[in-house]
Amino acid sequence: MASALEQFVNNVRQLSAQGQMTQLCELINKSGELLAKNLSHLDTVLGALDIQEHSLGVLAVLFVKFSMPNIPDFETLFSQVQLFISTCNGEHIRYATDTFAGLCHQLTNALVERKQPLRGVVVLKQAIDKMQMNTNQLTSVHADLCQLCLLAKCFKPALPFLELDMMDICKENGAYDAKHFLCYYYYGGMIYTGLKNFERALYFYEQAITTPAMAVSHIMLEAYKKYILVSLILHGKVQPLPKYTSQIVGRFIKTFLTLSLQDMASRVQLSGPLEAEKYVLHMIEDGEIYASINQKDGMVCFHDNPEKYNNPAMLHKIDQEMLKCIELDEKLKSMDQEITVNPQFVQKVRQSNIQGIPGKVMEISYLK
């Protein structure tokens, strides 16, 4: 190895042994150019480092190897990344979650390009477990996992991560790209649609659509198209979006509230109104929607669900939903309590009171 690489290895070993992870992160952030200039020696560097003891050093090397324009031996690199993610020190990599997530994004893109999405599913599940501080924390890798599960048509591995209520976001180097947030809910909605869990799918599309935004992204637009279709299947009509939906989003999507067979065909890329009519008729026959088709003008009229909500099964379902609401209420109270004792929140309230800003913030609970 060149002397500069030897110094890099020695510094990684020394800082890791001393537990100086912040300084080690600074080192690997500055070493990208050095490692990129010595690509032929990087496997030797990996051999000199222990994955468990020197996780951040190994991460830096693998990230640079995956950043190469042309990967000469993808199978070897895939095996190295697979071994690293499964055996690395989770406490260490949480100091560099942005680089760790970046490695996962690179792996995802490479597998998508090679049409091998299934190979990355288990690896990304392990990566999420390494990054999370708790199971209710959303990371940017969640979206990658959902994307691979969709492309592989293997939905079940993603379900444990989709069924949890996300209460926190993993800040990767103090930031989080909204694209990954939107993709998580968009891909999640598509997975639930594929499983015909339309109620959960509708919720996920709604989250993608109602995310506060200064402009409507392509992801939000695609989510709304699918929101319309799933809403028609589930309720027989397009459900209105919540009142807290951004005005920008609301103005943009108003044009989608009226649909004809021709509209449906063009939105979901069918051959024409006849094919759209065939799908609608099948859904009516299967009891998925309640509608009638006006053959004269090609318009679909949707009717209310005839369910009266007065049978034992429905009462049991309502009871279960009430229990979920009670559980959610308890979580919100707990979060409210955490906010009121947060030092930053207390300091901000104190400054507001000193400046004479009206409102007794400290005496107000968000749940009252």
Image: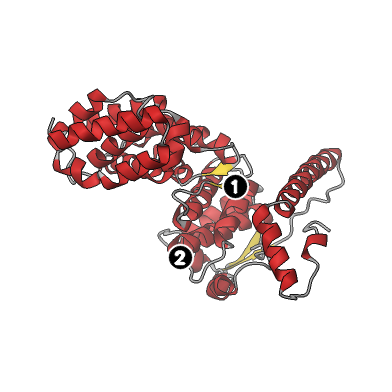
Between marks 1 and 2 in the image, the one whose residue lies nearer the viewer: 1
- Quarter-of-image position of residue 357: bottom right
Q: Which residue is mark 1?
A: 168
Q: Residue at x 53, y 57 (%)?
A: 226
> Within 10 angstroms of label 2, few (less than 14), some, or many (20 or more) residues?
some
Q: Which residue is mark 2?
A: 217
User: Where does the image place residue 49, in percent across and percent down from the top left?
Assistant: 28, 25
User: Where does the image place residue 311, in percent across and percent down from the top left?
Assistant: 86, 42
Q: Is residue 260 above or below residue 89?
A: below
- Horizontal side of 281 relative to 99 (left or right) equals right
Please state which of residues 50 and 185 is positioned toward the viewer in this rendering: 50
User: Where does the image place residue 54, in percent across and percent down from the top left?
Assistant: 35, 28
Looking at the rendered structure, the kind of residue marked 2 is: Ser
- Quarter-of-image position of residue 21: top left
Q: Does label 1 or label 2 sit earlier along the sequence?
A: 1
Q: Are marks 1 and 2 in contact (CB under 8 Å)?
A: no
User: Considering the image in quadrants, where does the C terminus appear?
Assistant: bottom right
